Amino acid sequence: MYLWIKALHIVFIASWFAGLFYLPRIFVNLAQETNPAATERLLGMARRLYRFTTILMVPALLLGLYLAMMIGMKHGWLHAKLVLVILAIGYHHACGSILKKFERGVNTRSHKWFRWFNEVPVILLLVIVILATVKPF
């Protein structure tokens, strides 16, 4: 049963992070867009993606917590991974906050800032996968 839960966890994590990779790319386009019709289309895409990504995050986290309880919380790598997962949740919510600013028309950040912001989930996922696979401590 453990391997089935682990497989589902990986699928939901990959799906959640796919959304975290793409949503800031929409923000890059929104920060550059001057056409109101295109802006509204991009906002619609961002809203739907954020909602869907939030739905995907929930089973990813629940399955991960279940796995953590199955193996026990005695591993240092798991503690580090959980800290990074908390940062990923914070990043997810930051995306929601940014989306609300775009919806209100009060975004002050440049497309360049969003290009850098888009790198955060890449780094988080890289380190999380290394911790979960290599288990360095």
Image: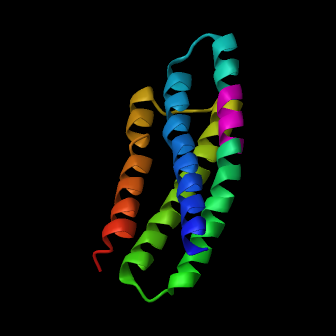
Q: Residue at x 39, y 47 (%)?
A: 122
Percent position of residue 107, x then y: 58, 33
Residue 106, above or below 129: above
Percent position of residue 13, x then y: 54, 55
The quarter in which the C terminus is drawn is bottom left
Percent position of residue 27, x then y: 54, 31
Image position of 134 (left or right of 28): left
Residue 120, above or below 21: below
Q: Please, what is the dominant secondary structure of the magenta stretch?
A: helix
Q: From the viewer's side, name the closer residue of 65 and 86.
A: 65
50 in magenta: yes
Specify the segment rendered in magenta.
44-51
The reply to whether residue 90 is visible in this rendering is no
Label tally? 0
Q: Residue at x 67, y 13 (%)?
A: 36
The reply to whether residue 28 is visible in this rendering is yes
Residue 66: quarter of image: bottom right
**How are the colours assigned in the image?**
rainbow
Percent position of residue 20, x then y: 53, 44
Q: Residue at x 70, y 35 (%)?
A: 47
Q: Residue at x 39, y 68 (%)?
A: 132
